[in-house]
Image (cartoon, rainbow, N blue to C red):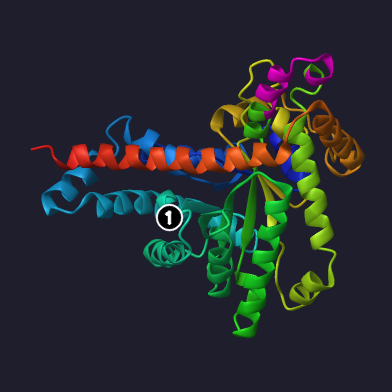
Amino acid sequence: MSETLRKLSGQGVSIWLDDISRERLRTGNLADLVRDKSVAGVTSNPTIFASALSKGDAYDTQLHDLRVRGVDVGEAVRSITTYDIRWAADVLRPVYDASGGVDGRVSIEVDPRLAKETEKTIAEARALWWLVDRPNLFIKIPATVEGLPAITACLAEGISVNVTLIFSLERYRAVMDAWLAGLEAAKAKGLALNGIESVASFFVSRVDSEIDKRLDGIGTEQAAALKGKAAVANARLAYAAFEEVTASPRWEALRAAGARPQRPLWASTGTKNPDYPDTLYVDDLVTSGTVNTMPEKTLDAVADHGKVSGDTIRPFYEDAWNTMAALKDAGVDYDDVVRVLEDEGVEKFEASWNELLETVAAELKKA
């Protein structure tokens, strides 16, 4: 096992793989990563599934059977994706059991075309929860305005939720409010709170990509000096907000009833700028009670040369506030940045979902 990844786990960071495919599952690769690289969870999204379907022959038999049965493309996609999720959940079940249900989780996302439709998101989440039927499942719901009441409704029914596509501090606070409201409703119904888990996926690298582009456009020395600093600062301040909420009387009442925290999860942690260290969004976001979900390339980089040197979040709150203030002074409109990122995030996942539908539809049409 990688010593660096072992140390990262020892700091209280749960290491999750941001990828899934039938090939990983049938070759035992996922089980190997659990054993050798401290992987304790898996996340998926439409882009990941679209990529998996486009490679190799792992899905050929199932696609053939679906074609013979004459199922429509929507049912086919659900059959294919939930099969992988169930398999991955079974591989990770020992981790789930050993961690008391905290880790060993596998996430599947609701149809991203429903991101702006509350009731349909809730219905889709219920269907996926029933269809996968594994206790270590997370249903991913986007943190759109319309997604917030869906988050509350699902948690209130005992459905564990991974809230995705969070970019702004304001929206993150709204997500935490939706989480608390869901647990309060579950408590009122008499549900056991210790079985309802949640994570909040705060996206990292895309923040730097968007803000760096704007800093280049501003073109001043002051702007250039701020490149590559926004994403980490934003995530650190998200953790500060998490600490504030979990110190509140509202949370304490739920904790006393058996609830567990909605852990911050750092998503999109592969660096997109080759000038930045490839372990930047892991090394600089270490603290206990968090999750870092990594593409395999980033996981391998951390295993090889990551730097784990204690808490790299809580001692740096003041630096993070100063960075955000400097960005504002330089002319970066933070509110516009996060609005653009959310809109683009939904659009990208919709495009990937449509690509997935088209790929499966083409397979189903084969003679």
From the top left corner, tell me how far across and down residue 175 is, in percent. 66, 58
User: In terms of secondary structure, what is the magenta stretch mainly?
Assistant: helix
Is residue 270 visible in this depiction of the protein? Answer: yes
Q: Report the label total.
A: 1
Task: Give the quarter of the figure containing the C terminus.
Answer: top left
Residue drawn where x is 46% and y is 52% of the image: 108
Residue drawn where x is 73% and y is 78% of the image: 257
Instruction: Find the magenta span and give its range.
Output: 211-223
- Residue 103 sits in quarter: bottom right
- Residue type for callout 1: Leu
> Does residue 272 sit above or below 337 in this rendering?
above
- Residue extending furthest toward the left: 367
From the top left corner, tell me how far across and down residue 263 is, in percent. 70, 55
Residue 74 or residue 102, whichever sits in front:
74
Q: Is residue 128 magenta?
A: no
44 to the left or right of 270: left
57 to the left or right of 112: left
Residue that label 1 marks = 114
Residue drawn where x is 83% and y is 14% of the image: 221
Residue 356 or residue 60, whichever sits in front:
356
From the top left corner, tell me how far across and down residue 282 is, in percent. 71, 34
Task: Give the quarter of the figure containing the N terminus.
Answer: top right
From the top left corner, tell me how far across and down residue 44 is, in percent. 48, 45
Is residue 20 visible in this depiction of the protein? Answer: no
Badge 1 local density, few (<14 within 10 Å), some, or many (20+)? some
Residue drawn where x is 62% and y is 33% of the image: 206
> Does residue 100 sit above or below 85 in this rendering?
below
Residue 70 or residue 2, whichever sits in front:
70
- Residue 61 sits in quarter: top left
